Structures are given as C-alpha cells and as structure tokens.
Image (tube, rainbow, N blue to C red):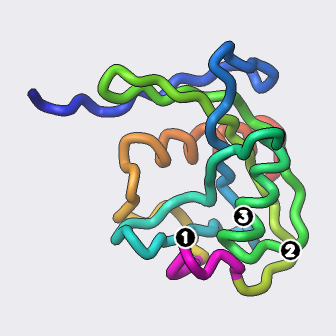
Amino acid sequence: MEDMAARVMFYGVDYIPEEGLTYSVIPARYRRRWIFVRHYDSDGWELAAGHIEKGESAEDAAGRELTEETGAREFMLYPVATYSVEENGVKDYGQLFFAEVTEMSDHTDIAEISEVIICDWLPEDMTYPDIQPVLFRKVIGYIREKSLF
C-alpha cells in the first residue's frame, strides 16, 4: 500500500486539542533571512522544531528548541496557529510560532544538529516536504497580515 501525503490543518492559536500538543515548530528570521537546521541523521533541511516536554508549555518548548537548534540568543516569539498533521491514519497536533531573531551565537545541540544555514527562502531539499513548507507559508501569511516584514 502506498503512503499518502501528509495532511496539514490549521486551527486558532488558542485551540488545544483533547490529545494535547506534541510539537512546537518555529520558522525563524534573522536579519531578514530564514534559519534552517540539518540533523545528523538527515540529508534535508528543517525548520527549528521539537517535542514539547512534560510540564512544558508550547511557547517554552519553542524558545528552548530555537535556542538549542539554531543558536538564537535574543528573539521575539509570535504564536501563529495550532496545527495538525495527519499521516498514515495518525494525527498529531503542534503549535506553530514565528521568531524574529536579533542575536545569534553557535547552536548548543551538537549531539543532534550538524549544521545551521541562513537563506533567503526555503531550501529545495527539505526533510519533510509535505509538512514544513506548508507551515512556512502559513507563517509568511501571518507576517504579511501583521505587517512584520
């Protein structure tokens, strides 16, 4: 049986599903360019993201993951939406943020992240091409709506 593409849905920013939130995803901009990371176990690029730990808010997880994965030190986090990803009959929920980064240093997650790049737009070789470009476009719409460009 052939795998179906992931289905991404968006909900209001305050929506918390009964199942809870699993992930925080943080498209981040630094000096008007976008930050992407590559994990050691992947050939593709990703947005900063990670699991929400037990007892941690989605916003706290977003700040922690952004700092660990990209080296962002000073930033503003903007909650954009709750989202779900349905893939192979399994649905997980997460919180989507936008981060405007004003100060960077080296990333600290050296066990997981092999490389950090700063680009004008999405790299072609994304690890999750059915999911992360959709989340990225949602953030672009949010930035335009809020006049954050």
Q: Are marks 3 and 1 in contact (CB under 8 Å)?
A: no
Image position, residue 105 (x, y; %): 78, 85
Could you tell me the amino acid type at mark 2? Arg
The correct choice, above or below, for 131 with respect to 149 in the image is above
Q: Quadrant of the N terminus?
A: top left
Q: Is residue 4 left or right of residue 18?
A: left
Image position, residue 61 (x, y; %): 77, 50
Q: CA distance from mark 2 to mark 1?
A: 16 Å
Which mark is in front, 3 or 1?
A: 1
Q: Which residue does the numbered mark 3 point to in the structure image? A: 29
Could you tell me the amino acid type at mark 3? Arg
Numbered range of the magenta stretch? 107-117
Q: Is residue 78 left or right of residue 69?
A: right
Seen at 53% across and 23% down, the residue is 9
Q: Are marks 3 and 2 in contact (CB under 8 Å)?
A: no
Q: Quadrant of the C terminus?
A: bottom right
Seen at 74% across and 20% down, the residue is 16
- Circle number at residue 37: 1
Label 1: which secondary element: strand
Which mark is in front, 3 or 2?
A: 2
Label 3: which secondary element: strand
Could you tell me the amino acid type at mark 1? Val
Q: Are marks 2 and 1 in contact (CB under 8 Å)?
A: no
Mark 2 residue crowding within 10 angstroms, few (<14) / some (14–19) / many (20+): some
Seen at 48% across and 72% down, the residue is 38
The correct choice, above or below, for 32 with respect to 50 in the image is below
The correct choice, above or below, for 1 with respect to 62 in the image is above
Q: Is residue 49 left or right of residue 44?
A: right
Seen at 72% across and 46% down, the residue is 53
Q: Which residue does the numbered mark 2 point to in the structure image? A: 73
Q: Is residue 114 magenta?
A: yes
